[in-house]
Image: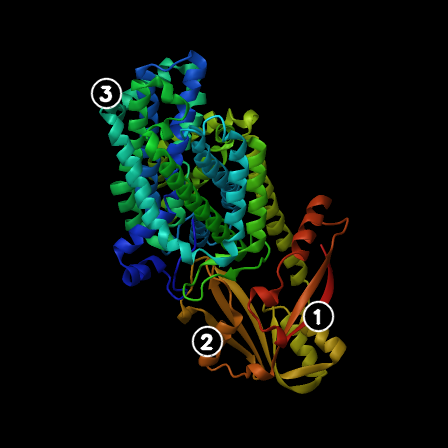
Amino acid sequence: MTTLPADPANSNPAANDHVKRGFWGLTLTAIGVVYGDIGTSPLYAFRESISHVVERNGAATNAEVIGVISLMLWALISIVTLKYTMILLRLDNRGEGGTLSLMALVQRTLGKRTPFILIVGLAGAGLFYGDAMLTPAISVLSAIEGLAVLPGLTGRIEPFIMPITLGILIALFLVQRHGSSIVGAWFGPICILWFTVLGGLGLMHLSEEPGVLAAFNPLYAVSFLLNHSALSCVVLGSVFLTVTGAEALYADMGHFGRKPISVAWLWLVFPALALNYLGQGAMVIANPSTIGNPFFYMAPDSWRPALVVLATAATIIASQAVISGAYSLTQQAIQLGLLPRMQILQTSERHHGQIYMPQVNYLLMLGVLFMTFSFGSSSALGSAYGVSVIGAMLTSSLLAILAIWKVGKRPLWFAIALMSPFLLIELIFAGSNLLKVFSGGIVPLVIAAGFAILMWTWVRGSALLHEQTRRDVSLQQMLATLEVSPPKRVRGTAIFLTADPQAAPTALMHNLKHNQVLHEHIILLCVKTAPTPRVNDADRVTIETVRDDIRIVTLSFGFMETPNVIRGLTLARERGLAFDIMTTSFFLSRRALVPTAKSAMPRWQDLLFVFLARNSSSATEFFHIPTSRVVELGTQVTI
């Protein structure tokens, strides 16, 4: 998932992009962004899957190799082709996809945020962060491990694999602040070359054992599971590596549109992946000695250096996509009230939506480096990888049932019947991945749980803080007081930011109490997040006149947009709101939170909420308010 050019005024950016860039331009870019993660799975998926058979039996028979390949092919067909391209890509929130977008869509339809929907959404978001830390680690490390099969380097390069990998990962995160627009244009062409090479290598080896094509018959997959009952769960845990990255198809729908993503999958990505897995199987059957690292052994000795370079480039692109996806998901979570405000920087003057978040970037970097160094090899990482991914898939399936039922207005039995086969398959994969818990799989679960707790703490603490705000003086009470005892009026306009326009802003009350003055014109400004990705400019501003000198202005922004107060006020001025920015002051309340023994949350959660609030970005920075026009008034609030 990544952030690409989009018009904030358009509720369906994918359709707008179709006009600007053309269908094939979108398809090319989608190949480089959407399929980077799943496209690097051939580096390790078959190797890890067949290794369990070899470890248990000492060798793999032809039938076992074909059975494993059949499981991999049908995982791609059932989960990616049927679930994502045929069903989920049709469940869009005004062009946007992804777990949080689907959650917002269901909430908008229901008219409220239910505990079940919130828990599923928090779980899906938390699991994505676990995946975001594992994907760069396993992808880049598996590519660099290819150096060990190069002629002349075998037995000599191994001590340098970890330092090289860590160096590449550190460099990748350090260049994020400069954006990806310069190198982003190469993502599509490089990935097209990558998938062409995947398919070509597979075709080269199919002639060695054409019988491997029988893997398209699902009976071979069923036969393997029935004949290896004790081993099947372990193998399925590694087979699932074949479909890691499938969530990107749905998450990136808003940037490319359903058709470009579907066409890229059906006509290039899936055929290339299928051919490569079949080719790896054919080669292992014909030459069992290649089973240690079948992907790189597919290439002739003279080609392997170039293949290692290309694989490294592909894994860097996959890592870039998931890092950008973490920025995009975090931005959505902030706008939906699931996380505190964080610094969001635009990295492109020409393309709206290309963002960089320093806090997220460095947190991810520490997590990825820890994963890479502590696990030490892609095989060890494979034991942890997949646990968070299958959890995210389960959450999307559960939300899809609600969306088909409530949004699509289909009978509940139809929604359950449609999604049950996928839920069953995912539950089987989830069971097999749970076996990895004691061999590293606990790590992504702990990461996901940590992020989910952070988000739940912020949601709960914000709700308690809102309850405190509701006890403040109401706007009508304040106006009645002003009628009885009018303060001294000063020239100019004062804008007071408020979360609740029906309550008197704390900053306004403090200004009256301490300065004993009131400006000639008062604007109570409320910034709200709509349950849609973007809001049209025509619907962005509402103006309510309380009395001649006091107005309430509400600015609405979508959860994929960065709130910009000045831009919103410019629209308001075009609609008759009179004010001069040079004689206008913005008054903001800065609350100092103090936990109390009577809080509705446990002590540890109070302290965590206070920590998050203190370290959140200021409203001035987040809402893009000119710092020279801002006055902050502090107050202490107990929770």
Which one is in front in this view, the residue at disc 3 or the one at disc 2? 3
Specify whether residue 570 is in view: yes
First in sequence: mark 3 vs mark 1: 3
Q: Helix, strand, or loop for circle 2? A: helix
Q: Residue 493's quadrant in the figure?
A: bottom right
* Foreground disc of the pair 3, 1: 3
Q: Which residue is mark 2?
A: 571
Identify the element where label 1 is drawn: strand
Q: Residues within 10 Å of mark 1 (few under 14, many from 20)?
A: some
> How far apart, in angstroms, are the residues tagged by discs 3 and 2?
67 Å
Image: 120 above or below 155: below
Q: From the top left corner, tell me how far across and down residue 36 is, in percent.
A: 39, 43
Number of numbered labels in the structure image: 3
Q: Residues within 10 Å of mark 3 (few under 14, many from 20)?
A: some
Residue position marked by numbered label 3 in the rendering: 211
Q: Report how far apart the C-alphas of labels 2 and 1 lie in the structure.
A: 27 Å
Image point 35% across, 35% down: which residue? 79
**Residue 521 x, y percent position in the rendering:** 60, 83
Q: In the image, residue 491 lies at what x, y percent?
A: 64, 87
> Looking at the picture, which amino acid does disc 3 mark?
Gly
Q: Is residue 575 visible?
A: no
Choose top left, top right, bottom left or bottom right for residue 42.
top left
Instruction: State the residue position of label 1.
Output: 633
Q: Quadrant of the C terminus?
A: bottom right
Contact? badges 3 and 2 (CB < 8 Å):
no
Query: Callout 2: 10 Å neighbours few (<14), some, many (20+)?
Result: some
Toward the viewer: 601 or 234?
234
